[in-house]
Image (cartoon, rainbow, N blue to C red):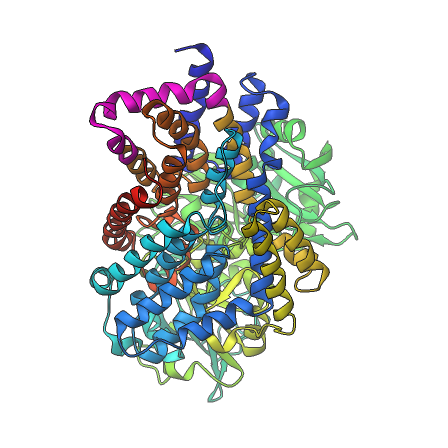
Amino acid sequence: MTLEIAGVLTILVVSLILFLTERIRMDLVALLVLGSLALTGLVSPTEAFSGFSNPAVVAIWAMFILSEGLSRTGVADQIGKWILRLTGESEARTIIVIMSAGGGLSAFMNNIGVAALLLPVVMDIARKTGRPPSRLLMPLAFGTLLGGLTTLIGTPPNLLVSAALREAELPPFGLFDFTPVGISVMAAGILFVAFVGRGLLPTVDPASDSLKNSPESLREQYALGDRTFVLRLENDSLLAGCTLAQSRLGSALGLHVIALVRDGSTRLAPEPGTVFRAGDRLVAQGRMETLDELQGWREFAVDPDPGDPRDLLGGNLCLAQAFLKLESSLAGKTLAETDFRNRFGVNVLLIRKKAGQARSSVQDPYLQGGDRLLLHGPREKLDQLEQASSDFENFEEASESDLGKVQSFARKIFEVAVPEGSFLGGKTLAESRLGDGFGLRVLAISRNGERKLLPGPEEELLAGDLLTIHGLPVDLKILRGLQELKIEEETSVELRDLDSEKVGMIEVVLAPRSNLGGKSPRSLHFREKYGLQILALWREGRPYRSGLRDMELRFGDALLLMGPREKLDRLAEEPDFLILTRRERPAVDTAKGPVAAIIMAAVLVPVLAGYLPISLAAVCGAAFMVLTGCLKMEEAYQAIEWRAVFLIAGMLPLGLAMQQSGAAEFLAQGMVGVLGDFGRWPVLMGLYLVTAMATTVIPTSALVVLMSPIVLKSCADMNIPPHTGMMAIAMAASASFTSPISHPANILVMGPGGYRFIDYLKLGIPLAVVTFIMVMLTLPVFWPI
């Protein structure tokens, strides 16, 4: 093994580990691979960036635009509806039609887009036929994957293996060279799922889903009644006069107020600015236990005069002021969202806005460039913040008199004793939610005659502790008001009343190209941005109804939303969501439909005739889609799955390095050495199985890039026609059935179908076996060796 081979294999192994662990985004891993290859001299700078101009990469992003044009002009939607009208009463027939429709469209469109397009339609079929969506959505996803096997443009792996042949100075695959094998595999897969595999699909009582997407069934599906109760404000409640947002029911207790009952009338989905009155009854959803825990605060003894606030500057603690830079990454976020205390190790006592207004309540306002922050903390932390932070400027040490300025803005420092038997005993400051929930910051803890200044979030509270707290009097008042809320054991409010002409509920999933994945509703300011409440979230076969504000959203999650119907209608126009309730889906403008169809035909005909390469034809077609108004340029940019583009372009140089360094030959010799004695077909089967198993954890496009040089060298060593070997691994890479993470189309249906990881294994593994058998049977017929 040479030094170059060792270097390439090291980069290969590290990239595979990063793909498996998902500690770093896959597209970022690809860029790191690109940079590592160039910096180590394994490829030249020109070769490192050659992936971005690779014809296969160009064809892939152009096909995204063409697919979006067909979708936005209603061509694909109309074709899907025509085909799906053929569904009947038989479940097997319904599955055949759904998989055929998805597969047929996926032959010429991006399969993720096809799955997203047909998802609401299949949900409607499930509702009308009384079948659980879980019986139909996985077949839809698998049908789109099978359809991608049938043409050159059906899926990125097909384009990549063709490009690999061209780079090896071999004839590339034509548009329909995949069709004989692909159609055979697709037909066998559809028949298997329809008549055998559907017995492996999860199922529930059809009667419980007969009204799927109706308010009644959504409430039942998400088990809203299990976490719904009524709270009553007493006549002397301290919360009277406070708004819903000020009450901190959501931020502190994680409760959602879905209705307010006042004077016999019910107000659904009250706005954050709704003012409470004495006697109001709040229909809330969440964990009732949080209110029980809050009772531990009742016996707190509050001392409003804890002594001289200058004592808080003892030891190495001091005050400093700094200005937030205009380009700061903290701008547009609240202190809670930035995790300021844990991130920087200091407290913010005061925020003075650029206009001169001082905000003594520092938890809720959004930070802006130019804000002046009064900071309190250890001197070394403040010094580190000044020297290393790119978010602040104009640091200067504040005088002790600045602490008095804080109090002049109605801030108070008071002391609270933790009583014996309090639920807070043994909890850390972070677990108490004093800061995030109530805006109260613990500046010191006195225990056994010793005083610990500025305790960290991991500090454990004990009975008998005396806490020096910094906060507004209204914060303590709200805390007391929450303690006084009464939970009604019997209520006349029914869940079926929580729907009206003005307020409704819908179910949505994150769209394939949504940017919301990995972000929490709190960080997205979901309620403020969309005007809707998240009542529940469905993930991996179960609903979540509490703690939703801080849960990171994942691709495949289904969300149950409630709010004014005009806001629900507006949500249908958001590109980040797919609406599962048919009533809420926006209509498409079909006026440009014929134009889009003609453009797509104009792309395919010259490619089929051999006049133009698919990359050039697709780019021209994408340009005409925009030029003719089938979609806007902004929509074209949004249609491109840039993560896939960067992933493929970044990994292509690794395939080149494997060829030039001899790493591909080294691995191929290992494969041939193990299986070569058994003959050519066992080698081909081995290459197929390695590729198929790797699709469970490695992105298919990256996998094809890595396998192509190994397959070409193995085929050369065993005298196997290269087109036969490349066809085999293209089929293996695209048949990604065995897990939800194997392909985005699988994740897309996970939430709406209520699937668990094991459900994909139950059907995906047998279907993968059927695919393998069909490929091995048809390859020698159409691509003999």
Would you say residue 400 is visible in this rendering?
yes
In the rendered structure, the answer to whether residue 759 lies left or right of residue 99 reads: left
Q: How far across and how far down the image is residue 326, in percent?
A: 74, 43
Judge whether residue 325 is colored magenta: no
Q: Quadrant of residue 272?
A: bottom right
Would you say residue 287 is visible in this rendering?
no
Span of residues in magenta: 657-685
Residue at coordinates 54% horizontally, 52% vertically from top-left? 608
Judge whether residue 681 is colored magenta: yes
Residue at coordinates 39% horizontally, 70% vertically from top-left? 122
Judge whether 156 appears above or below 83 on screen. above
Closer to us: 766 or 389: 766
Q: How far across and how far down the image is residue 489, in percent?
A: 31, 77
Q: In the rendered view of the protein, which quadrant contains the C terminus? A: top left
Q: How far across and how far down the image is residue 64, in percent?
A: 56, 53
Q: How far across and how far down the image is residue 577, in percent?
A: 52, 63
Q: In the rendered view of the protein, which quadrant contains the N terminus? A: top left
Residue at coordinates 24% horizontally, 26% vertically from top-left? 675
Give the main secondary structure, helix, strand or loop, of the magenta stretch.
helix
